[in-house]
Image (cartoon, rainbow, N blue to C red):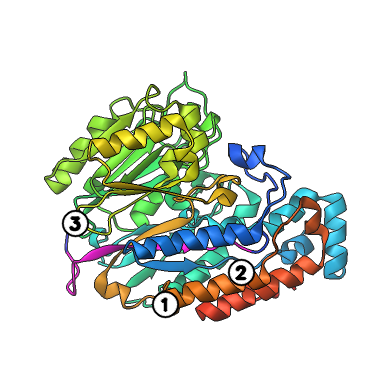
Amino acid sequence: MPMPEHTTHTVELSLEGLVGPTHNYAGLSPGNLASQHNKNLTSKPKTAALQALDKAHFLTQLGIPVLIFPPQPRPRLDILRALGFNGSNQNIIKTACKQAPHLLASVYSASSMWAANAATVTPSTDATDNKLHFTPANLTSNLHRSLETHHTANVLKQLFPDSEQFHHHPPLPTSSNFSDEGAANHTRLCADYSSPGLHLFTYNKSNQTDTDSPDTHHPDVPEGDGRQSFQASRSLAHQHQIEHNQRLFIHQHPCAVEVGVFHNDVIATGNRNLFLYHENAYLNPDILNTITEHFCALSNQSLHIRKITNDHLPLKDAVESYFFNSQIISPTPKDQILIAPLEVKQNKYAFALVEHLLEQNILTDAHYLNVRQSMQNGGGPACLRLRVPITTDQLKHVHIHALLTPKLYEQLTNIINDHYRDSLAPDDLADPTLITDANTALKHIYHCLQLNYTQNSIS
């Protein structure tokens, strides 16, 4: 694999999602147990945004570079107009609330805060053209998320603007055969961030045409409600110019999907040469050996891989605590630091597992952060970020105004405190003044980050 000519030192940048001012609990995501269980609760947009921002700030204090991924313009009244709702903004909101409340909630959704679903990323180390690759996820499985793709692509191009350094691909076709949920189903394992990586593409949706897909046909196993297709995962690997010996396509167990594992990052997690997965994660019972053999052949180093059994962490507790949706970061080459939600500390199985991993020196440290507003909608610390392995030279070419500094942290905190609502009940989506309030907050955020902001979709 040819290496970049300029520098081979790679760090991991964390693109951190900022929660939008219309954060609400509408239960829009089938299969996401937290989203369904907390449907119609009153949300706290200000608290949610501050929790996510504080988490991002904490990462910078540990030495991780952070780029802020801003909320998207909401509500998307252009979608309601395209669906036949006419008149003033107030009339559109009022009519949609009465006739199609689910549609109204969809166009108000703040789900873009879960940056792990924004795109799939491949570092220049692993691409034959030596560029950092991005493909925005099409998110075709749910209406409210499919509305994010175009804006995500636009923002990514602004955040990573240099075409000599960064390769931006169009989203995959909007067909169920190419259903793509982004990096939530993608893990890169490597000896260190600068070394060639092994890409694990997990899929949970396939069809009879997938004759070259391993583990595809299991007639005795229920299909489940899959969101990531094999065709999408394979296409991403092709787009990003990843060599055949650096990629594996792995079939997630449909039984796990049925109990709330809608993305692979709810049941498996990896960082550098560490990979943790639940015993119910994959169909292939030999997956441990398969991953280990490929990793060792690629890196000539050992992989620290651990299968977490139901005895140590029952599947139900894995989903409830979101243990696997913790972040694992390496500010230094010796670090494997866990950034877990408070729910892990409050679950006896998950907390005992963390303590065991610390005792075994598999993890070097663990921190428990409060991101409960996101958790109640089905997204933990790992959902709130997109991992971007980036060379130190490429880092000089990102949009500097979105890099989180103490000053930017203070500015965004003030904007959130000044312009976000303390609470948002389901009936508040029918309040036309929410449109103005949200637009004002977002204009301040985009101005602060020096990013282009258009309100055409909400006017």
Residue at figure coordinates x 45%, y 57% from the top left = 385
Residue at the spot of label 2:
416
Give the percent coordinates (x, y) of residue 204.
46, 36
Q: Which residues are magenta?
A: 3-20
Local packing at callout 1 (Cα closer than 10 Å; few below 14, some 14-19, many 20+) is some
User: Given the current orientation, which residue lies at the most extreme left position?
Assistant: 300
Give the percent coordinates (x, y) of residue 53.
50, 63
Label at residue 446? none
Label at residue 399? 1
Residue at figure coordinates x 38%, y 61% from the top left = 59
Q: CA distance from mark 1 to mark 3?
A: 25 Å
Q: Amino acid type of disc 1? A: His
Q: Amino acid type of disc 2? A: Ile
State yes or no: residue 4 in magenta. yes
- The answer to whether one can see residue 326 in this image is yes
User: Who comes first in sequence, dot 1 or dot 3?
Assistant: 3
State yes or no: residue 264 in magenta. no
- Residue at disc 2, secondary structure: helix
- Residue at disc 1, secondary structure: loop
Q: CA distance from mark 2 to mark 3?
A: 39 Å
Q: Amino acid type of disc 3? A: Ser
Instruction: Please tell me which residue lies in front, 264 or 418.
Output: 418
Q: Assign the C terminus to one quadrant of the image.
A: bottom right
Label at residue 195? 3
Q: CA distance from mark 2 to mark 1?
A: 22 Å
Quarter location, residue 75: bottom right
